[in-house]
Image (cartoon, rainbow, N blue to C red):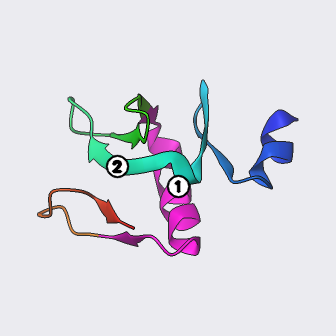
Amino acid sequence: ELEVILSDWGFFRCHQSYLIRLEDIQEIVPNSFGQTYDAVLVNGVTVPISRSKTQALREALQNQGVRFLCRKERNYFSL
């Protein structure tokens, strides 16, 4: 499966329809509905993060040294 092969290259399936490269994530923000999150990529594209993938994405980013901030902060993670 493509997802397994690309995971070795830093890609992550954040949604059923999206496979993104972790290092291309600029910030994580709550979506307009407020119950899930979106990833804003360095090229300005916004990609949804499914509820079932949120914790796995958090762990994958933390493994790369990304520190998550509390909800009161402007962004939800920091490089």
Mark 2 residue element: strand
Q: Mark 1 points at which residue?
A: 57
Q: What residue type is labelled 1?
A: Leu
Q: Which amino acid does label 2 sit on?
A: Ile
Q: Where is residue 10 in the image (x, y as percent from the top left)?
A: 69, 54
Residue at 43 percent of width and 40 percent of height:
41
Point out the stretch of residues depicted in magenta: 48-68
CA gap, disc 1 to disc 2? 10 Å
Quarter residue 47 falls in: top left
Q: Is mark 1 on a helix, strand or loop?
A: helix
Where is the C terminus found, in terms of image quarters? Answer: bottom left
Residue 12 falls left or right of residue 65: right
Provide residue 32's location: percent of width, then percent of height: 20, 29
Between residue 46 and residue 32, name the one nearer to us: 46
Q: Which mark is residue 28?
A: 2
Q: Is residue 27 magenta?
A: no
